[in-house]
Image: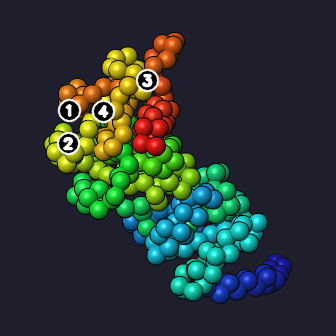
Amino acid sequence: MKKPRPRRPGPAPHPPRAGRPPQPAGRAGKPRGPVAGKRHRGRDEEMFHGLRACEAILARRPAAIVRAYLTEPRRRQFAKLIEWCVAERKGFQIVGGESLERLTKSIHHEGVAILATAVPRWTLDDLLAHVAAATRPGPLVYLDGVQNPHNLGSILRTAAHFGATAILGAQGELPPLSPAAVRVAEGAAEFVAVCDLGDPVGDLKRLAKAGFRIVATSSHRGRPLADTRLGGKTVIVLGSEGEGVTRPIEVLAHECGQIPGTGAVESLNVGVACGVALAEAWRQRS
């Protein structure tokens, strides 16, 4: 009977890399992109992205910045952001485009992202205090049933262009200022306030007592918008594309302004309707 041959010793296992636990036998570790933004993100923080959005955060709310991420081509353009992060001991990282896409969950990051505290929302008391201190406040825009974040972003951009003071809506119904909405706003989210109304009917009545005219808009009825008084302290009410302005809000209006057109389509996109109304309000103020 032959004696069994002794087994040759197998290759020694590689020592684990410093700072990482050893991988279980038979399972290779999967490559991972940067996840620092996910690991340390606070509950009230958002990963904002896009050129204009990030420029506006640096200009208007630098203290809100937690960390910054840039691709190499954006390093020179955002040198001030890097300098600010270094001076304030905030983290920044140069990353590849694919890594930034993972961090922002968007292909529209434009090579820069900032982890920052969420854009603050105003209360009605905040708004009334601001209006009382303003020499010539711009119009307010009340969104009745508008819940699409991209619509909110485009409306903010239009509102900033035409000098509106704030966007209003029912609390819990007005869309959140998500990173996507802020990117679409092209920086306007840092210039135009968004105000939640806990009691829309009662709060609009308070604004009326404070001297604001409430003007509802429609594609089918009312005086032509050009003949509607929109100058001065005005709340322009825009309804959703499907339902329009709801009855409880419509009855509060001092006037209804119609956006004239061919009638070939049921209504305008709410962002376009907002642009038409605010352009007319700007014309009347000028």
Is there a contact, CB below 8 Å, between mark 3 and mark 1?
no
What residue type is disc 4 on?
Val
Q: Earlier in the sequence, mark 3 or mark 4?
A: 4
Query: Which structural element holds mark 3?
Result: loop
Q: Residue placed at 31% from the left, 30% from the top? A: 216
Distance of label 3 from label 1 (alpha carbons): 19 Å
Compare residues 21 and 42 and report the one nearer the observer: 42
* Residue at 31% across, 41% down: 234
- Measure the C-alpha gap from mark 4 to mark 1: 9 Å
**Location of mark 3 (residue):** 259
Which residue corresponds to mark 2? 208
Tag 2: residue type? Ala
User: For mark 4, what is the residue?
Assistant: 215
Q: Secondary structure at mark 2?
A: helix
- The mark closer to the camera, 1 or 2, is 2
Mark 1, secondary structure of its residue: loop
Amino acid carrying label 3: it is Ile
Type of amino acid at the residue the image marks with label 1: Leu
Q: Of callouts 3 and 1, which one flags the residue occurring earlier in the amino acid sequence?
A: 1
Quarter occupied by residue 83: bottom right
Q: Is residue 177 above or below residue 155?
A: below
Question: Does the residue at mark 4 contact the one at mark 2 (Cβ under 8 Å)?
Answer: no
